[in-house]
Structure formats: structure tokens, C-alpha cells
Amino acid sequence: MTKPHARTTARRAGALAAALVVGATGLTACSDESGKPTLNWYVNPDGVDTLTALAESCSTDDYDIEIQLLPSGATDQRTQLARRLAAEDSSTDLMSLDPVFVAEFANADWLERLPDEAASAATDDDVLEGAAETVTWDDGVYAFPQWANTQVLWFRKSLAEAAGLDMTQPVTWEQVIDAAADNGGTVGVQANKYEAYVVWINALIQGAGGQVISDNEAGKDAKIEIDSDAGREAAAVIEKLAGSEAAQADLTTSNEGTSLGQMFGGPGEFMVNWTFVYQNYKGLIESGDITEEEFADLGWARYPATVEGEESKPPIGGIDIGVGAYSKHPDFALEAAACVTSAEAQVDLAVNEGLMPSRTSAYESPELAEAYPADLLDLFSQSVDSGGPRPKSAYYATISAAIQSVWHAPTSVDPDQTPEESAAFLREVLDGKALL
């Protein structure tokens, strides 16, 4: 395993370069405080051990970085951070942000806008396009990409072979659902009434060539696009799975963890899920929960296509590091953010925690080559580079909640009604004529 503290010297050199950039902006830490300042870094619960080690190794003679843990759910994370920032909390220095938070927080002037040179470094050609897109808002850069998440199709090779599917070629949702149903398997998704269900809906719509909204920066006046042929194609996929024998028993409450245990039971499953899956299953060999032979039966392929012949749009997630606009130490915080998002830090997160890099150079590291199959690394990076982000909007939390209200439960989704109803409800909510 890669030890984060082993590369402190290299990381400090990168941080020093970032400090020179930040220092040029004229931002200075408060000098009326006594003692060495502590920068609070609010993190989500993913990869806490490695994040804690990064906080230690990126601390300097000028400041210490201290981890503060956020709730596990994305909605609760947003709520806690938003409350602090709305109150102009000066102790919120660094934040681990779900990409969909960046536009909202930047629009509210809660994030420090990166100086030009730091912004260029945070989104340079080494950063995967899909990850770089998540940190921009209104022609500015407001965060540093740290790790880039995406979903792929995980499956039992033996199940795909029994179904006659050539998994080296693109497959559709219809093919996957039929293959599982006809061969005693299941299809694992995230369809509880929460953010990940919107991730699925959005990916299905984008995979059919559509989008949830357009003219995003118009805020409440954005054009609602969900009532479209693409919206109906997405609803048809959900309807098909919900009515299929391939649907898992807990479909309406399913999340990222519920279908993990069904991969190696009986014929197995096809499952769309995030990058952590590989390390999760690999760890089960040592614990004796699965055998080497079972692990060897695990396959992976690009996210399924919504429409045959159209390229799928894998979901893009991950974490971006933002600096609080009310921090007393913005120069130190920008320096620290550059440090904890360095290519070396991203390698640590990938090898130790299964949280994949946002930088191409990290994917090319020997540590990752040893920890992951080459074709899986290629699949992860290609999926991020060509995937589809969720709508970038200052009102994303409202948009997501409105979609969940109409599209859940998945067993009630109707292609002829659900997209139209959700478009009408979303318009009313954004116009202040309906409450969530």
C-alpha cells in the first residue's frame, strides 16, 4: 500500500509552487492571532484514513490541517456546509465537495475563486475533461478536482457468457435486463429516493441524447428539458427493469451497497456502481468471503447504453476541494488545497481507498498499475473523460429533490406520464408555485 507520508517532500515542493501563485493575489492570513493556525478540512466519510494522512503530510511549519467529518449522505453534507457558509463561518477553511455543490456554493459567493494561475493549474491538460468541468462556474474556477468517480457495469463473466453477450462490445440496458432475467440473474442499481437515483435518471437521459435542463446559468429560469424523447427513453428503461424478473427485491430502496452481496450468489448479477467496487471485492478474498476463482469471474464494461447505437454517458462524481470564502487564512487554505489534490495524493487515494484520480498522470503511475488491471484503469479514465455530469445549476438541490418526488418509486415510472409530470412539477417548484 502507498504510504501518504512517504512523499511529504515532493508534495511540499508542489505546495510551495502553489503558494507562490497564491501569494501573488495579495491574500494574507490574519496576523493578529497568536500561535500556529489550524485549517479545518471538512471531509465526507470516504477514505478517511488516507485523507487524515494527507492532512498530516500537507501540514507545514506555517499551519496544521485538521480533519472534520461530515455526515455520510450527500444531502446532509450539503446542509451542514451550507449552514456554516451562510453564517459566514470563518473556521470553514477547506471543504470536500460533491461536484454538484460547486455551482450552488460559487453562485452564493461561499467559495474562494481561484486566482488565474492556480485556476489554470487546477484544470490543466493533465486533468480529465469530465473532472475539470465540475469545478467551473460562470467563467471562473472555484475548486480543485481531487478524485473522480464514475460508474461502470460490473458483472459475472459466467452470467454474461450464459446469456451470449459479447461484453467487449457496447451493450444496452435492454440487453442487460433481458440477459439477467433469462438466466436467473439480477440487475443492481441505485433507486432509493435519494441523490444516486437522480444520477441514474440523468445518465439514462444523457445516454439518449437529452438533458434535464438547459441554459443552466439562468438559475430558476433555466429551460426544463426532461419532458422529451430522451426523458421517455430513460423512463422506459426504469419501467422495464421494475417489471422484470431481473429486478432485485429491494429495488425501491436500493443503494450503492445493497446489491454488492448478490454478485457471487447463484448466477450473479449485472450491476452499475462506482469505482470502489473492485477494491471492495478484492478485499473479500483475504477475509474468506469469496474465493480467488469467484473474484476471477468478476468482469467490467462501459456503462450500458440507453439507446442502441448511441454512446452511453457514464455518471461523473467524485470530490472537489473548495476554499471557504470566509476563511481567515485563504492563502494557506489555497496552498493546502493544491497539496491534498496533487497527483501523488490522488495515487494514495486510489491505491488505499479505491477512489480514482482526476489526473491522467496519476493513472499512469506504477502504483496504480500494480493495484488495478490495465483495462480497468482505461475504462475508469475513459468513462470520466466522456461521461455526463449532473446539471450544473445554483438550484441543483431543488432540481434533484423535485425529480426524486415524481420519479420515485421506480415501480411507478411510466414513460407516457412521468417525464411530463416531472417537468411540470419542476417548473412550479422553481417558480415558487409548489413546495417540495
Image: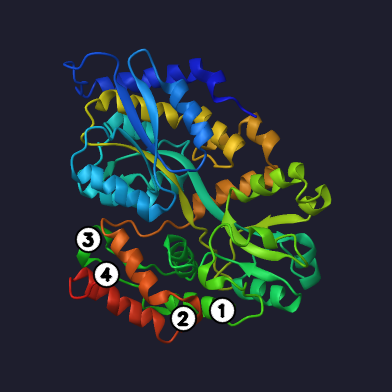
Eye-nearest disc, 2 or 3 = 2
The structure residue drawn at horizontal position 22% and vertical position 24%, both measured from the top left corner, is 25
Answer with mark 1 or mark 3, whichever residue precedes in sequence.
3
* Left-right relation of 70 to 217: right
Q: Which residue is mark 4?
A: 223
In the rendered view, tell whether residue 368 sits above or below residue 230: above
Q: Are marks 1 and 2 in contact (CB under 8 Å)?
A: yes
Label 1 Cα neighbours within 10 Å, binned few <14 / some 14-19 / many ≥20: many
Tell me what residue is drawn at x 49 percent, y 65 percent. Answer: 200
Measure how far apart labels 2 and 4 are at the Cα level.
Answer: 23 Å
The amino acid type, in three-letter code, at marker 1 is Ala
Residue annotated with mark 3: 219
From the viewer's side, name the closer residue of 206 and 259. 259
In the image, farthest residue toward the right: 293
Q: Name the one closer to the observer, 310 or 221.
A: 221
> Which mark is drawn over residue 413?
2
Q: Nearer the viewer, residue 383 or 268?
A: 268
Spatial CA distance of label 1 from label 4 is 29 Å
Q: Earlier in the sequence, mark 1 or mark 2?
A: 1
> What is the C-alpha distance between the residues marked 1 and 3?
33 Å
Quadrant where the N terminus sits is top right
The numbered dot on residue 361 is none
